[in-house]
Image: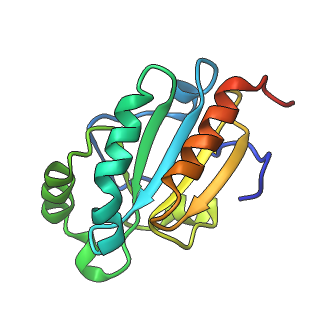
C-alpha cells in the first residue's frame, strides 16, 4: 500500500478472534492501527508487550486491529494461534489471514508491521520491524493532532 491510499475492506478472514470488525466500524471516529504478526515470528512475540502497552495507552484515541499472517504451514493451526494470542495478551480483534487475502491486499511482506490510518481511512504511516515503537508513537500522535488530509 502507498501512503494516502484508502483502507481496504477487511475481507477474506478465515476466522476472527476477539470479535469481528469491518472498515465501516473503523472509519469516522478515530484513527486505526492495523498490526500484522505471526505465531512463528520471534520478534513479534518479543515486541508484543510494547504493542499491548501502546494499544492500552491509546485505547480512547485509536482503534487497534491485529492480522495474523501465517509464514508457514505450522502457522495455520487455529489452536496454536488462539493460545499464542492469549499468552501474548492480544485482546484486540484479530483477523486470521490463513489464505493471505488481506496480506495481499495490503501488499504486506513483513511481520511485525504497522499501518496507521487517519479517521477518514487514509494511510498515513507504514512501519515494519521490531524497533521503532517511539517512531510509531510519534507518527500516531501526528495523525491524532493533525486535521485529516483529503
Judging depth in this view, the residue of 68 and 111 nearest the camera is: 111
- In the rendered view, tell whether residue 108 sits above or below residue 28: below
Q: Is residue 6 left or right of residue 88?
A: right
Q: How is the image coloured?
A: rainbow
Q: Quadrant of the C terminus?
A: top right
In this view of the protein, can residue 141 be seen by the observer?
yes
- Is 141 drawn above or below residue 7 in the view shown? above
Q: Quadrant of residue 52?
A: top left
Task: Tell me the quarter of the picture where residue 120 sits.
Answer: top right
Q: Quadrant of the N terminus?
A: bottom right
Look at 84% across and 31% down and name the residue there: 149
**On screen, residue 42 above or below 144:** below
Question: Where does residue 124 sit, x and y in percent of width and height?
Answer: 72, 44
- Asked whether the viewer can see residue 41, the reply is no
Residue most extreme to the front: 134
Nearer-the-camera pick, 38 or 46: 46
Residue 75 in which image quadrant = bottom left
- Counting the numbered discs, the total is 0
The residue that appears at 42% across and 67% down in the rendered structure is 99
Task: Indicate the position of residue 73 as horizontal and vertical percent values.
Answer: 28, 81
Question: Residue at the right extreme?
Answer: 150
Name above or below for residue 56 compared with residue 14: above
Q: Position of residue 83 (x, y in %)?
A: 12, 56
Q: Position of residue 35 (x, y in %)?
A: 46, 52
What's the residue at 61%, 42% (across, down)? 138
Residue in the image at 28% along x and 64% along y: 45
In the displayed structure, does residue 83 sit left or right of residue 51? left
Foreground residue among 140 and 67? 140
Amino acid at each position: 500500500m502507498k501512503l494516502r491510499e484508502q483502507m481496504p475492506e477487511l475481507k477474506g478472514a478465515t476466522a476472527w478472534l476477539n470479535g469481528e470488525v469491518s472498515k465501516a466500524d473503523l472509519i469516522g471516529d478515530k484513527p486505526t492501527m492495523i498490526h500484522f504478526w505471526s505465531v512463528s515470528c520471534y520478534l513479534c512475540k518479543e515486541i508484543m508487550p510494547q504493542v499491548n502497552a501502546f494499544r492500552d495507552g491509546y485505547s480512547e484515541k485509536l482503534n487497534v486491529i491485529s492480522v495474523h499472517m501465517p509464514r508457514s504451514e505450522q502457522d495455520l493451526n487455529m489452536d496454536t494461534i488462539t493460545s499464542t494470542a492469549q499468552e501474548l495478551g492480544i485482546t484486540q480483534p484479530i483477523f486470521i489471514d490463513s489464505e493471505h487475502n488481506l496480506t495481499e491486499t495490503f501488499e504486506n511482506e513483513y511481520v511485525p508491521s504497522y499501518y496507521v490510518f487517519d479517521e477518514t481511512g487514509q494511510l498515513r504511516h507504514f512501519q515494519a520491524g521490531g524497533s521503532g515503537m517511539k517512531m510509531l508513537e510519534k507518527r500516531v500522535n501526528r495523525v491524532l493532532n493533525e486535521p485529516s488530509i483529503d
